[in-house]
Image (tube, rainbow, N blue to C red):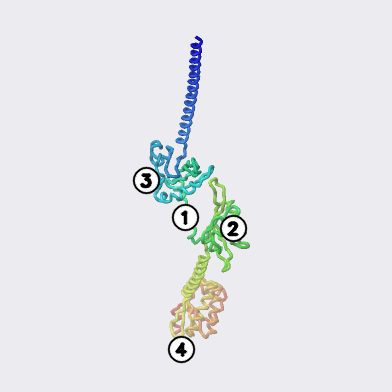
Amino acid sequence: MRDGAENGGGIEAERDALRAEVVALRQKLAEAERAAAAAEAERAFLHAVVHKNPHLVYILDVAEPRQVFANRDLAKVLGHDVDAGGVLAEREFTSLLVEEDAARMDEIMAPIATLRDGEMATVEYRLRDVRGEVHEVLDHCVVFERSPDGAVRKVLGTVVDVTEQKRMERKLSEQQAVLQAFLDNTPALMFVKDTEGRFVLVNEEYGRFAGHTPGAMLGQRGSFVLKGADVEKMDAADRRALAEGRMQFVATIGMPEGAKTYLTVKFPIRDTRGAPFGVGTVAIDMSREQEAEQARATLQERIIAAQEATIRELTTPLLPIGDHVVAMPLVGTIDERRAQQILGSLLDGIGRHGATVAILDITGVRIVDTHVAQALVHAAQAARLLGAQVVLTGISPPIARTLVDLGADLQGIVTLGTLQSGIAWAIRQRGGAR
Protein backbone atom coordinates (compact mmCIF):
# COMPACT_ATOMS: atom_id res chain seq x y z
CA MET A 1 0.00 0.00 0.00
CA ARG A 2 2.89 2.19 0.70
CA ASP A 3 4.10 1.59 -2.86
CA GLY A 4 0.71 2.58 -4.25
CA ALA A 5 0.65 5.74 -2.22
CA GLU A 6 4.09 6.67 -3.34
CA ASN A 7 3.15 6.13 -6.97
CA GLY A 8 0.01 8.22 -6.55
CA GLY A 9 2.02 11.08 -5.10
CA GLY A 10 4.48 11.07 -8.00
CA ILE A 11 1.71 11.29 -10.60
CA GLU A 12 0.15 14.25 -8.81
CA ALA A 13 3.48 16.08 -8.75
CA GLU A 14 3.87 15.57 -12.47
CA ARG A 15 0.39 16.95 -13.03
CA ASP A 16 1.23 20.07 -10.98
CA ALA A 17 4.41 20.57 -12.97
CA LEU A 18 2.49 20.24 -16.22
CA ARG A 19 -0.12 22.71 -15.01
CA ALA A 20 2.60 25.22 -14.07
CA GLU A 21 4.24 24.78 -17.46
CA VAL A 22 0.93 25.35 -19.23
CA VAL A 23 0.37 28.52 -17.20
CA ALA A 24 3.86 29.71 -18.04
CA LEU A 25 3.29 28.94 -21.71
CA ARG A 26 -0.01 30.77 -21.63
CA GLN A 27 1.72 33.78 -20.04
CA LYS A 28 4.42 33.72 -22.69
CA LEU A 29 1.79 33.41 -25.40
CA ALA A 30 -0.09 36.35 -23.94
CA GLU A 31 3.09 38.36 -23.75
CA ALA A 32 3.92 37.43 -27.35
CA GLU A 33 0.44 38.41 -28.46
CA ARG A 34 0.76 41.72 -26.60
CA ALA A 35 4.18 42.30 -28.17
CA ALA A 36 2.82 41.41 -31.59
CA ALA A 37 -0.11 43.74 -31.07
CA ALA A 38 2.22 46.49 -29.92
CA ALA A 39 4.48 45.86 -32.91
CA GLU A 40 1.47 45.89 -35.22
CA ALA A 41 0.24 49.10 -33.61
CA GLU A 42 3.70 50.62 -33.96
CA ARG A 43 3.91 49.43 -37.56
CA ALA A 44 0.46 50.85 -38.26
CA PHE A 45 1.46 54.11 -36.58
CA LEU A 46 4.68 54.37 -38.57
CA HIS A 47 2.80 53.39 -41.73
CA ALA A 48 0.26 56.13 -41.06
CA VAL A 49 3.00 58.67 -40.29
CA VAL A 50 4.91 57.83 -43.46
CA HIS A 51 1.86 57.82 -45.71
CA LYS A 52 0.31 60.91 -44.15
CA ASN A 53 3.60 62.79 -44.17
CA PRO A 54 3.24 65.88 -46.39
CA HIS A 55 6.64 65.07 -47.87
CA LEU A 56 7.45 62.42 -50.43
CA VAL A 57 9.21 59.55 -48.63
CA TYR A 58 10.96 56.49 -50.02
CA ILE A 59 13.52 53.80 -49.15
CA LEU A 60 16.13 52.97 -51.77
CA ASP A 61 18.32 49.88 -51.98
CA VAL A 62 21.63 51.46 -52.94
CA ALA A 63 23.29 48.22 -54.06
CA GLU A 64 20.69 47.41 -56.71
CA PRO A 65 19.64 50.32 -56.94
CA ARG A 66 15.90 49.77 -56.68
CA GLN A 67 12.95 51.30 -54.96
CA VAL A 68 12.01 49.34 -51.81
CA PHE A 69 9.30 51.61 -50.49
CA ALA A 70 7.51 54.81 -51.45
CA ASN A 71 4.69 56.57 -49.64
CA ARG A 72 1.37 57.38 -51.24
CA ASP A 73 2.19 61.02 -51.97
CA LEU A 74 5.26 60.05 -53.97
CA ALA A 75 3.17 57.53 -55.87
CA LYS A 76 0.51 60.15 -56.58
CA VAL A 77 3.06 62.70 -57.77
CA LEU A 78 4.23 60.11 -60.26
CA GLY A 79 0.67 59.57 -61.43
CA HIS A 80 -0.42 56.56 -59.36
CA ASP A 81 -3.61 57.10 -57.39
CA VAL A 82 -3.18 53.78 -55.52
CA ASP A 83 -1.27 52.32 -52.59
CA ALA A 84 2.43 52.91 -53.25
CA GLY A 85 3.52 49.47 -52.02
CA GLY A 86 2.23 47.58 -55.02
CA VAL A 87 3.24 50.15 -57.61
CA LEU A 88 6.71 51.50 -56.92
CA ALA A 89 8.16 48.75 -54.72
CA GLU A 90 10.98 46.84 -56.39
CA ARG A 91 11.10 49.34 -59.28
CA GLU A 92 14.52 50.16 -60.63
CA PHE A 93 15.44 53.69 -59.66
CA THR A 94 16.64 54.53 -63.18
CA SER A 95 13.20 53.69 -64.60
CA LEU A 96 11.78 56.65 -62.67
CA LEU A 97 14.34 59.16 -63.93
CA VAL A 98 14.38 61.16 -67.13
CA GLU A 99 16.81 59.79 -69.70
CA GLU A 100 19.49 62.42 -69.13
CA ASP A 101 19.54 61.83 -65.36
CA ALA A 102 19.43 58.04 -65.74
CA ALA A 103 22.61 58.36 -67.80
CA ARG A 104 24.33 60.16 -64.90
CA MET A 105 23.26 57.68 -62.27
CA ASP A 106 26.79 57.29 -60.90
CA GLU A 107 26.99 61.04 -60.33
CA ILE A 108 23.66 61.04 -58.46
CA MET A 109 24.57 58.05 -56.28
CA ALA A 110 28.14 59.18 -55.44
CA PRO A 111 27.28 61.38 -52.41
CA ILE A 112 24.76 58.79 -51.16
CA ALA A 113 27.16 55.85 -51.21
CA THR A 114 29.65 57.65 -48.96
CA LEU A 115 27.18 58.82 -46.31
CA ARG A 116 28.14 58.51 -42.66
CA ASP A 117 25.65 57.84 -39.88
CA GLY A 118 23.98 61.07 -38.87
CA GLU A 119 24.90 62.79 -42.13
CA MET A 120 22.49 63.87 -44.84
CA ALA A 121 23.17 64.08 -48.56
CA THR A 122 21.18 66.38 -50.83
CA VAL A 123 20.91 65.57 -54.51
CA GLU A 124 18.85 66.98 -57.40
CA TYR A 125 17.37 64.99 -60.24
CA ARG A 126 14.26 64.76 -62.38
CA LEU A 127 11.49 62.16 -62.22
CA ARG A 128 9.12 61.36 -65.08
CA ASP A 129 5.53 60.45 -64.16
CA VAL A 130 3.23 58.07 -66.00
CA ARG A 131 1.86 60.97 -68.07
CA GLY A 132 5.35 61.82 -69.28
CA GLU A 133 5.55 65.04 -67.28
CA VAL A 134 8.86 65.89 -65.63
CA HIS A 135 9.18 66.70 -61.91
CA GLU A 136 12.31 68.40 -60.64
CA VAL A 137 13.02 67.21 -57.10
CA LEU A 138 15.36 67.96 -54.24
CA ASP A 139 16.20 64.73 -52.36
CA HIS A 140 17.49 64.65 -48.73
CA CYS A 141 18.93 61.20 -47.89
CA VAL A 142 20.11 59.55 -44.64
CA VAL A 143 21.47 56.05 -43.98
CA PHE A 144 18.66 53.58 -43.26
CA GLU A 145 20.58 50.27 -43.23
CA ARG A 146 24.14 49.06 -43.68
CA SER A 147 25.46 45.73 -44.95
CA PRO A 148 27.66 43.53 -42.71
CA ASP A 149 30.79 45.13 -44.17
CA GLY A 150 29.57 48.60 -43.15
CA ALA A 151 28.66 49.81 -46.64
CA VAL A 152 25.47 51.81 -47.10
CA ARG A 153 22.78 49.31 -48.00
CA LYS A 154 19.58 51.31 -47.87
CA VAL A 155 18.82 55.01 -47.57
CA LEU A 156 15.71 56.82 -46.42
CA GLY A 157 14.94 59.80 -48.60
CA THR A 158 12.62 62.77 -48.29
CA VAL A 159 11.80 64.28 -51.66
CA VAL A 160 10.61 67.85 -52.25
CA ASP A 161 9.00 68.60 -55.61
CA VAL A 162 10.65 71.87 -56.67
CA THR A 163 9.29 71.90 -60.23
CA GLU A 164 7.30 75.10 -59.74
CA GLN A 165 10.09 76.70 -57.75
CA LYS A 166 12.60 75.88 -60.49
CA ARG A 167 10.19 77.18 -63.12
CA MET A 168 9.86 80.46 -61.21
CA GLU A 169 13.63 80.63 -60.77
CA ARG A 170 14.14 80.16 -64.50
CA LYS A 171 11.47 82.76 -65.25
CA LEU A 172 13.10 85.17 -62.81
CA SER A 173 16.50 84.41 -64.31
CA GLU A 174 15.13 85.09 -67.80
CA GLN A 175 13.57 88.34 -66.62
CA GLN A 176 16.85 89.34 -65.02
CA ALA A 177 18.67 88.47 -68.25
CA VAL A 178 16.24 90.65 -70.23
CA LEU A 179 16.66 93.49 -67.73
CA GLN A 180 20.45 93.13 -67.79
CA ALA A 181 20.43 93.11 -71.61
CA PHE A 182 18.47 96.37 -71.63
CA LEU A 183 20.74 97.83 -68.97
CA ASP A 184 23.92 96.89 -70.80
CA ASN A 185 22.75 97.96 -74.27
CA THR A 186 21.16 101.30 -73.46
CA PRO A 187 23.26 104.39 -74.25
CA ALA A 188 22.21 105.92 -70.91
CA LEU A 189 24.23 105.66 -67.70
CA MET A 190 22.26 103.49 -65.27
CA PHE A 191 23.18 102.46 -61.75
CA VAL A 192 21.78 101.83 -58.27
CA LYS A 193 23.31 102.76 -54.92
CA ASP A 194 22.24 101.54 -51.49
CA THR A 195 21.33 103.96 -48.72
CA GLU A 196 25.00 104.04 -47.69
CA GLY A 197 25.99 105.33 -51.13
CA ARG A 198 27.59 102.09 -52.39
CA PHE A 199 27.01 100.76 -55.91
CA VAL A 200 24.83 97.63 -56.02
CA LEU A 201 24.08 97.65 -59.77
CA VAL A 202 26.01 99.20 -62.65
CA ASN A 203 25.37 98.90 -66.38
CA GLU A 204 28.05 98.58 -69.06
CA GLU A 205 27.67 102.18 -70.24
CA TYR A 206 28.35 103.55 -66.77
CA GLY A 207 31.34 101.23 -66.53
CA ARG A 208 32.72 102.71 -69.75
CA PHE A 209 32.03 106.20 -68.43
CA ALA A 210 33.86 105.42 -65.18
CA GLY A 211 36.71 103.50 -66.84
CA HIS A 212 36.07 100.37 -64.75
CA THR A 213 34.29 97.06 -65.19
CA PRO A 214 30.82 97.02 -63.58
CA GLY A 215 31.96 94.21 -61.25
CA ALA A 216 34.87 96.27 -59.95
CA MET A 217 32.50 99.12 -59.06
CA LEU A 218 30.10 97.08 -56.91
CA GLY A 219 30.44 98.00 -53.25
CA GLN A 220 32.35 101.20 -54.08
CA ARG A 221 31.19 104.73 -53.29
CA GLY A 222 30.65 107.62 -55.71
CA SER A 223 34.17 108.93 -55.10
CA PHE A 224 35.43 105.84 -56.93
CA VAL A 225 34.09 107.44 -60.12
CA LEU A 226 33.62 111.19 -59.58
CA LYS A 227 35.92 113.75 -58.05
CA GLY A 228 35.66 116.89 -55.92
CA ALA A 229 32.49 118.93 -56.12
CA ASP A 230 30.83 116.43 -58.46
CA VAL A 231 30.83 113.82 -55.66
CA GLU A 232 29.21 116.24 -53.20
CA LYS A 233 26.64 117.27 -55.79
CA MET A 234 25.58 113.70 -56.64
CA ASP A 235 25.54 112.54 -52.99
CA ALA A 236 23.29 115.48 -52.13
CA ALA A 237 20.99 114.57 -55.05
CA ASP A 238 20.82 110.96 -53.80
CA ARG A 239 19.80 112.11 -50.33
CA ARG A 240 17.19 114.40 -51.77
CA ALA A 241 15.74 111.60 -53.95
CA LEU A 242 15.49 109.34 -50.88
CA ALA A 243 13.69 112.06 -48.94
CA GLU A 244 11.48 113.62 -51.63
CA GLY A 245 11.05 111.00 -54.36
CA ARG A 246 11.67 111.12 -58.10
CA MET A 247 13.58 114.14 -59.32
CA GLN A 248 14.92 115.30 -62.69
CA PHE A 249 17.68 117.80 -63.33
CA VAL A 250 20.52 118.70 -65.68
CA ALA A 251 24.00 117.99 -64.33
CA THR A 252 27.34 119.08 -65.75
CA ILE A 253 30.17 116.68 -64.95
CA GLY A 254 33.84 117.50 -65.40
CA MET A 255 35.65 115.04 -67.66
CA PRO A 256 39.27 114.87 -68.89
CA GLU A 257 38.08 115.66 -72.42
CA GLY A 258 35.87 118.49 -71.18
CA ALA A 259 32.64 118.99 -69.26
CA LYS A 260 29.63 116.93 -70.25
CA THR A 261 25.98 117.67 -69.63
CA TYR A 262 23.58 114.95 -68.54
CA LEU A 263 19.80 114.89 -68.21
CA THR A 264 19.60 113.01 -64.91
CA VAL A 265 16.68 111.23 -63.23
CA LYS A 266 17.02 109.93 -59.66
CA PHE A 267 14.37 107.93 -57.80
CA PRO A 268 14.09 105.87 -54.61
CA ILE A 269 13.85 102.07 -54.86
CA ARG A 270 11.63 100.51 -52.18
CA ASP A 271 11.19 97.04 -50.72
CA THR A 272 7.86 95.20 -50.38
CA ARG A 273 7.12 97.16 -47.19
CA GLY A 274 7.63 100.49 -48.93
CA ALA A 275 10.90 101.30 -47.19
CA PRO A 276 13.61 102.75 -49.46
CA PHE A 277 16.73 100.63 -49.74
CA GLY A 278 18.47 102.34 -52.62
CA VAL A 279 18.55 105.13 -55.21
CA GLY A 280 18.31 104.48 -58.94
CA THR A 281 19.89 106.84 -61.45
CA VAL A 282 19.43 107.23 -65.20
CA ALA A 283 21.62 109.83 -66.90
CA ILE A 284 21.49 110.66 -70.62
CA ASP A 285 24.40 112.49 -72.24
CA MET A 286 22.97 115.71 -73.66
CA SER A 287 26.33 117.19 -74.74
CA ARG A 288 25.90 116.39 -78.43
CA GLU A 289 22.33 117.64 -78.39
CA GLN A 290 23.46 120.86 -76.74
CA GLU A 291 26.22 121.28 -79.32
CA ALA A 292 23.69 120.65 -82.08
CA GLU A 293 21.28 123.11 -80.45
CA GLN A 294 24.03 125.72 -80.25
CA ALA A 295 24.85 125.12 -83.92
CA ARG A 296 21.17 125.46 -84.79
CA ALA A 297 20.95 128.68 -82.77
CA THR A 298 24.02 130.09 -84.55
CA LEU A 299 22.59 129.13 -87.91
CA GLN A 300 19.27 130.66 -86.94
CA GLU A 301 21.00 133.90 -86.02
CA ARG A 302 22.74 133.93 -89.39
CA ILE A 303 19.46 133.29 -91.17
CA ILE A 304 17.77 136.06 -89.23
CA ALA A 305 20.64 138.43 -90.03
CA ALA A 306 20.39 137.54 -93.72
CA GLN A 307 16.62 138.03 -93.61
CA GLU A 308 17.06 141.40 -91.94
CA ALA A 309 19.57 142.43 -94.60
CA THR A 310 17.11 141.37 -97.29
CA ILE A 311 14.33 143.28 -95.58
CA ARG A 312 16.55 146.34 -95.34
CA GLU A 313 17.23 146.12 -99.02
CA LEU A 314 13.54 145.77 -99.74
CA THR A 315 12.56 148.64 -97.46
CA THR A 316 15.34 150.95 -98.76
CA PRO A 317 15.51 150.04 -102.47
CA LEU A 318 17.98 151.96 -104.64
CA LEU A 319 16.96 152.01 -108.30
CA PRO A 320 19.25 153.14 -111.15
CA ILE A 321 16.90 155.01 -113.55
CA GLY A 322 19.39 156.51 -116.00
CA ASP A 323 23.01 157.27 -116.54
CA HIS A 324 24.42 158.42 -113.22
CA VAL A 325 20.91 158.85 -111.76
CA VAL A 326 19.55 156.74 -108.89
CA ALA A 327 16.26 156.91 -107.04
CA MET A 328 15.28 155.63 -103.59
CA PRO A 329 11.51 155.54 -102.95
CA LEU A 330 10.84 155.50 -99.19
CA VAL A 331 7.71 153.96 -97.68
CA GLY A 332 6.41 153.67 -94.12
CA THR A 333 7.87 154.94 -90.87
CA ILE A 334 11.45 156.06 -90.62
CA ASP A 335 13.06 155.66 -87.23
CA GLU A 336 16.66 156.34 -86.25
CA ARG A 337 17.83 152.84 -87.16
CA ARG A 338 16.16 152.91 -90.56
CA ALA A 339 17.51 156.36 -91.20
CA GLN A 340 21.01 154.96 -90.81
CA GLN A 341 20.12 152.15 -93.24
CA ILE A 342 18.84 154.71 -95.76
CA LEU A 343 21.99 156.73 -95.49
CA GLY A 344 24.20 153.66 -95.89
CA SER A 345 22.28 152.33 -98.91
CA LEU A 346 22.22 155.77 -100.56
CA LEU A 347 25.95 156.37 -100.24
CA ASP A 348 26.72 152.79 -101.33
CA GLY A 349 24.48 153.21 -104.40
CA ILE A 350 26.01 156.57 -105.34
CA GLY A 351 29.48 155.09 -105.21
CA ARG A 352 28.53 151.86 -106.99
CA HIS A 353 26.68 153.56 -109.86
CA GLY A 354 28.81 156.71 -110.06
CA ALA A 355 25.61 158.72 -109.62
CA THR A 356 25.61 162.49 -109.85
CA VAL A 357 21.89 162.80 -108.98
CA ALA A 358 20.16 160.92 -106.17
CA ILE A 359 16.39 161.19 -105.85
CA LEU A 360 14.80 160.55 -102.44
CA ASP A 361 11.04 160.11 -102.85
CA ILE A 362 9.11 160.39 -99.56
CA THR A 363 5.62 160.10 -101.09
CA GLY A 364 5.01 156.95 -99.00
CA VAL A 365 6.33 158.42 -95.73
CA ARG A 366 3.44 159.32 -93.47
CA ILE A 367 5.23 161.11 -90.65
CA VAL A 368 8.31 163.31 -90.78
CA ASP A 369 9.83 164.22 -87.42
CA THR A 370 13.16 165.57 -86.26
CA HIS A 371 14.90 162.23 -86.91
CA VAL A 372 13.58 162.07 -90.48
CA ALA A 373 14.47 165.68 -91.18
CA GLN A 374 17.96 165.23 -89.82
CA ALA A 375 18.35 162.03 -91.84
CA LEU A 376 17.42 163.85 -95.05
CA VAL A 377 19.85 166.69 -94.31
CA HIS A 378 22.65 164.24 -93.46
CA ALA A 379 21.93 162.31 -96.65
CA ALA A 380 22.21 165.47 -98.75
CA GLN A 381 25.44 166.53 -97.06
CA ALA A 382 27.00 163.10 -97.47
CA ALA A 383 25.88 162.89 -101.12
CA ARG A 384 27.49 166.26 -101.86
CA LEU A 385 30.74 164.96 -100.44
CA LEU A 386 30.56 162.20 -103.06
CA GLY A 387 29.80 164.75 -105.82
CA ALA A 388 26.07 164.02 -106.13
CA GLN A 389 23.00 166.26 -105.96
CA VAL A 390 20.08 165.15 -103.78
CA VAL A 391 16.55 165.70 -105.09
CA LEU A 392 13.74 165.37 -102.53
CA THR A 393 10.35 164.52 -104.08
CA GLY A 394 6.86 163.67 -102.85
CA ILE A 395 6.63 166.39 -100.20
CA SER A 396 2.99 166.72 -99.17
CA PRO A 397 1.59 169.98 -97.66
CA PRO A 398 1.51 168.52 -94.10
CA ILE A 399 5.12 167.33 -94.41
CA ALA A 400 6.19 170.72 -95.86
CA ARG A 401 4.58 172.44 -92.88
CA THR A 402 6.34 170.03 -90.48
CA LEU A 403 9.71 170.66 -92.10
CA VAL A 404 9.20 174.42 -91.76
CA ASP A 405 8.07 174.10 -88.14
CA LEU A 406 11.13 171.93 -87.37
CA GLY A 407 13.40 174.45 -89.02
CA ALA A 408 14.95 171.77 -91.21
CA ASP A 409 17.94 173.08 -93.15
CA LEU A 410 17.22 171.92 -96.71
CA GLN A 411 19.84 174.17 -98.28
CA GLY A 412 21.46 172.38 -101.20
CA ILE A 413 18.53 169.98 -101.62
CA VAL A 414 16.28 170.29 -104.68
CA THR A 415 12.67 169.79 -103.65
CA LEU A 416 9.97 168.79 -106.16
CA GLY A 417 6.39 167.68 -105.87
CA THR A 418 6.48 164.25 -107.49
CA LEU A 419 8.91 161.49 -108.34
CA GLN A 420 8.17 162.01 -112.03
CA SER A 421 9.14 165.67 -111.82
CA GLY A 422 12.31 164.69 -109.99
CA ILE A 423 13.24 162.22 -112.70
CA ALA A 424 12.53 164.80 -115.41
CA TRP A 425 14.72 167.33 -113.56
CA ALA A 426 17.55 164.85 -113.29
CA ILE A 427 17.37 164.02 -116.99
CA ARG A 428 17.47 167.68 -117.91
CA GLN A 429 20.48 168.15 -115.66
CA ARG A 430 22.21 165.26 -117.31
CA GLY A 431 21.31 166.66 -120.76
CA GLY A 432 22.70 170.10 -119.86
CA ALA A 433 25.87 168.58 -118.50
CA ARG A 434 26.49 166.83 -121.82
Q: CA distance from mark 1 to mark 4?
A: 97 Å
* Whether residue 68 is situated above or below residue 359 in the rendered picture: above
User: Which marked residue is nearer to the observer: mark 3 or mark 2?
Assistant: 3
Give whichever of discs 1 and 4 has the lower sequence position: 1
Q: Residues within 10 Å of mark 3 (few under 14, many from 20)?
A: few
Q: CA distance from mark 4 to mark 3?
A: 121 Å
Q: Amino acid at mark 3?
A: Gly
Q: Outermost residue, left direction? A: 131
Q: Residues within 10 Å of mark 4 (few under 14, many from 20)?
A: few
Q: Position of residue 272 (x, y in %)?
A: 53, 46
Q: Position of residue 362 (x, y in %)?
A: 48, 75
Q: Label 2, on which residue?
A: 220
Q: CA distance from mark 1 to mark 2?
A: 23 Å
Per the rendering, the mark at residue 218 is none
Q: CA distance from mark 3 to mark 2?
A: 50 Å
Per the rendering, the mark at residue 132 is 3
User: Which marked residue is nearer to the observer: mark 4 or mark 2?
Assistant: 2
